[in-house]
Image (cartoon, rainbow, N blue to C red):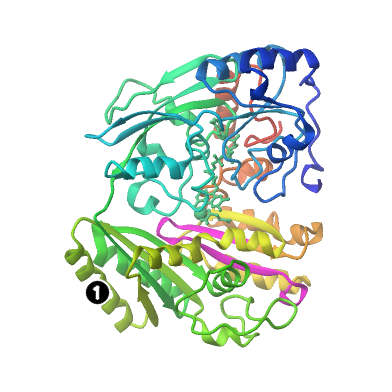
Amino acid sequence: RFLHAAIERNAAFDKVSEKDVAFFEQVLGSSGVISDPDALVPFNRDWQKKYVGNAKVALRPRTTQQVSELLRYCSSRRLAVVPQGGNTGLVGGSVPVFDEVVVSTAAMNRILHFDEVSGTLIAQSGAVLQALDEYAGQRGFMMPLDLGAKGSCHIGGNVSTNAGGLRLVRYGSLHGSVLGLEGSGGDGRVLDLLRTLRKDNTGFDLKQLFIGAEGTLGIITAVAIQCAPRPASVQLALLACPSFQAVTATLRAARRVLGEVLSAVEFLDQACSHLATRHLEGVRNPLVQQLQPLEGPQGGGEGGAGATHGSADAQSAPFYMLVETHGSDVDHDQQKMERFLESVMSEGHVTDGTLATSEAQAGAIWRLREGISEALVRRGAVYKYDVSLPTAVMYDLVEVMRSRLAAGGYGSDAGVLVVGYGHIGDGNLHLNISAPRYDDALLSLIEPFVYEYVSRHNGSISAEHGIGLMKAQCLSYSKGAVAVELMRRIKEVVDPVGIMNPYKVLPPR
Ligand code: FAD
Ligand code: 2HG
Ligand code: ZN
């Protein structure tokens, strides 16, 4: 596919032979080795169906020992490997680029230990996030991260991408909540760092290297994580804001008034709201009274904040926010939420709002926000940018991009939609450009412009999704030469033959 046009297969890697398959079957049994072309399809393509590889074999180990044996063998045979969890990654990191061996953690999903006093959980890396959250929930705890892909993503994939998600503003990053991990380096050496201690100052904190390494060092086989107490009281408000300035003012008020109970602050623009309600069954925005039928080539009011076309726009606000609290006292939290709403409404930062009065209502509001990625995929081709920027200027990038593309002939009349949403409480914007089809001329208007813009504003080209294949050639926009060289050297130590997830994260030399 066009995405691989500039990359050549590294000829130093050998191709999988029948003898290799026989070895894999000896280690895993035949059920752990997938080589049938049809059965390989889901291992070879990503969630967006944008990145498609050509692996001839996928492996499903069940134990750390098996992972170690497989990697030792692949190193000795110079067979490149791509680790795969739930395959929900958004930067092309979880699928082969060429014929790398896929090592899937899908069969490594056992929960190994739970401490009901401290809330520490140990699980194999292939455990699905939602299953872990349900398990912790039955014991009065919750996982410290939550994201739209929770039903499919694995904890090992979350840790490998250092996933952020919807509640990082409250529960912090995985660099803090992962207490320990176990993994195998590319050469098969098992690194046992599976501790559950809050405090452990014994030299280099090696587990941090694996958090966010995106499978370039080795394979995480188990994770120890600090769960948080499940809140007795949860409040969720969906708010309509008249401008992006009002969104940032509302964020400031949420921090000031809600303080320690604040658990999520998300935003989406008008175009996202329309996308989710139009492309996803049963999703509606309770603050938009009545949607108009689709109009025009771009589907009526999909034009985005500030756009004037499509009568549906007249009825909805330019921006929406989700503001959530987690606390232990319903009365106290409700009082705080009321004070917050009074403050932002009296100042005109919020023009309309609704409070969820049941778990079902809260779930429906979250679906509006969490469903945006899926709605975008349903609409057609998507160019995704996941950036950190100073909050005050964050949305400027969406507006600048909209004007730039329109001036280049890729406006809404060409079916191109530029939308912005994300974790505003963490300074994280998801800029997505939706188009009828992938188009190199459109891409050349977006990149490198978007990376230069982010770099100029001292932002990050990857806030939470990682670098993967998509941004490996662009790492220098966010990391200096010395840092990149150090990353290479660390990889050489942990993965001496260099078989782990080649072509990803690090730029070609
Ligand atoms: P995969 O996609 O399988 O892999 C991701 C990367 O990690 C790859 O490079 C892979 O090689 C590597 N990897 C996987 N498992 C291992 C392992 N055991 N050892 C070593 N390397 C491994 N991300 C966010 O940060 N925040 C969000 O809010 C968010 N929301 C999302 C919503 C949707 C609908 C979707 C589809 C994705 C979303 N993501 C989000 C992207 C996010 O990266 C993933 O959902 C998740 O963290 C990846 O987990 P996974 O198990 O699917 O990993
Ligand atoms: C989210 O916050 C995810 O919904 C996905 O990180 C963002 O699809 C995207 O761009
Ligand atoms: Zn996100």
Looking at the rendered image, the quarter that the N terminus falls into is: top right
Q: Position of residue 137 (x, y in %)?
A: 33, 45
Q: Position of residue 160 (x, y in %)?
A: 52, 35
Q: Nearer the viewer, residue 366 or 425?
A: 366
Give left or right: position of 296 versus 167. right
Q: Callout 1 environment at 10 Å: few (<14), some (14 to 19), or many (20+)?
A: few
The residue stretch that appears in magenta: 411-432
Q: Nearer the viewer, residue 457 or 329?
A: 329
> Residue at the location (31% across, 43% down)?
138
Q: Quadrant of residue 79?
A: top right
Q: Position of residue 7 (x, y in %)?
A: 78, 37
Looking at the rendered image, the quarter that the C terminus falls into is: top right
Q: Can residue 350 be seen by looking at this rendering?
A: no
> Residue at the location (56% across, 45% down)?
478
Give left or right: position of 173 versus 117. right
Q: Amino acid at mark 1?
A: Glu
Q: Quadrant of residue 10?
A: top right
> Residue at the location (73% across, 65% down)?
435
Residue 296 falls within the magenta-colored stretch: no
**Residue bearing mark 1:** 338
* Vertical order, 290 against 3 (above or below): below
> Residue at the location (74% across, 39% down)?
41
